[in-house]
Amino acid sequence: MLVDNVSITVKAGNGGNGSMHFLRNAQTRKGGPDGGNGGNGGSVYLQGVDDILGLAQFRFRKELAAEDGISGGGKNLFGRNGDDLTIYLPLGTQVMDIETGQTWQIVDTTRPILIAQGGTGGRGNNEFKTSTNQTPTYAEKGTPGQVRQLQLDLKIIADIGLIGLPNAGKSSLLATLTNANPKIGNYPFTTLEPNLGVLIMQDNKRVVLADIPGLIEGASAGKGLGSEFLRHVEKTKFLVHCIDSSSETITSDYQTIRKELESYSEILAAKQEVILLTKTDLISPEELEKKVQEAKKLNERVYTFSIYTPKETHQQLAALFQSLTQ
């Protein structure tokens, strides 16, 4: 399941308490203070990862915590520092502290971002020994680790978004060109959530495609599957507008979706797109040419697709999609 917006709570580890202890053994009846310091709590870091589905880990796991520092002990034993926690988020994620409004952008996979500082370990009573106070009877407690409530919002989910009316052939296109395995059926609303697939090109470049669930007239006002999926469309870089080539209302089909994009947001309406006429095996070549000319009145860039065309044709379409993202 694609998760692109979620709230979580992160907590850094608490510092361990310092020890209040005096040396006592068979050889030393009343030794001096030997309480060790507590360890520091682990901190929480965020780091990018090349996994578009990375936020799914938080679907049911809403609280994450680094390890607490261990308290000090007698004989000047220092407590161990708590282990840090690194949370891996998809590249393109915006992180916002809900309380303060501070934001961070996850933009690379190498530099971790400190998001919650671990608590400091308390000092043991040996640290407080002075020439005028040889037997301090107190030690520090560790300080608490930082807690943040974070809103995670994946700003980009795919290079290319496949849009169109229900049953426009988007899922078949995704399954043919990528490693995705979407549910495909000859009825409206087969796709109930965005499916993602990855094109692996000869130069090992990866192009992520998102099959956005079918939109209908009024989707921007919440009808059908609602405006939730228009939000997904907004998080793609480029749009491929799929239209069933056997439709008798190509122009109307196109304008229905365009109206919803424009009603939802100016950003979405301004995204670059091409038209892809699908299911071309259902009509004759002569009829297809008429449909292509009709579609070119709506958008100069018009392409065609059928799952039954040769593999070489599919590879050419994949190369086209790669060029659209450059």
Image: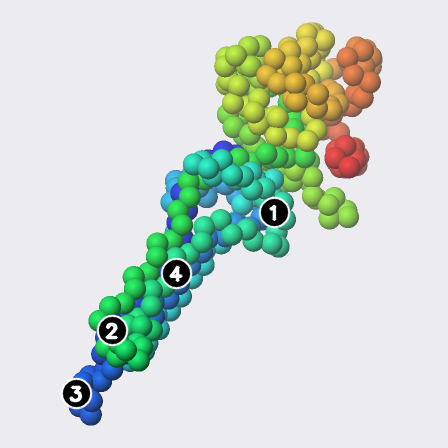
Q: Name the residue under label 2.
A: 136
Q: How crowded is mark 1: few (under 14 residues within 10 Å), some or many (20 or more)?
A: few
For label 2, the SS is loop
Q: Name the residue under label 4.
A: 120
Query: Of label 3 and label 4, which has the lower sequence position?
Result: 3
Q: Which of marks 2 and 4 is in front?
A: 2
What amino acid does circle 4 point to? Answer: Thr
Residue 249 versus residue 84: which sits nearer the camera?
84
Query: Of label 1 and label 4, which has the lower sequence position?
Result: 1
Please name the residue shown 49% across and 35% down the image: 101
Q: Residue furthest bottom?
A: 27
What amino acid does circle 2 point to? Answer: Pro
Q: Nearer the viewer, mark 3 or mark 1?
A: 3
Q: Mark 1 points at which residue?
A: 50
Residues under labels 3 and 4: Cα distance?
A: 33 Å
Q: In this view, does 55 lie to the left or right of 284?
A: left
Q: Mark 3 points at which residue?
A: 29
The image quarter containing residue 168 is top right
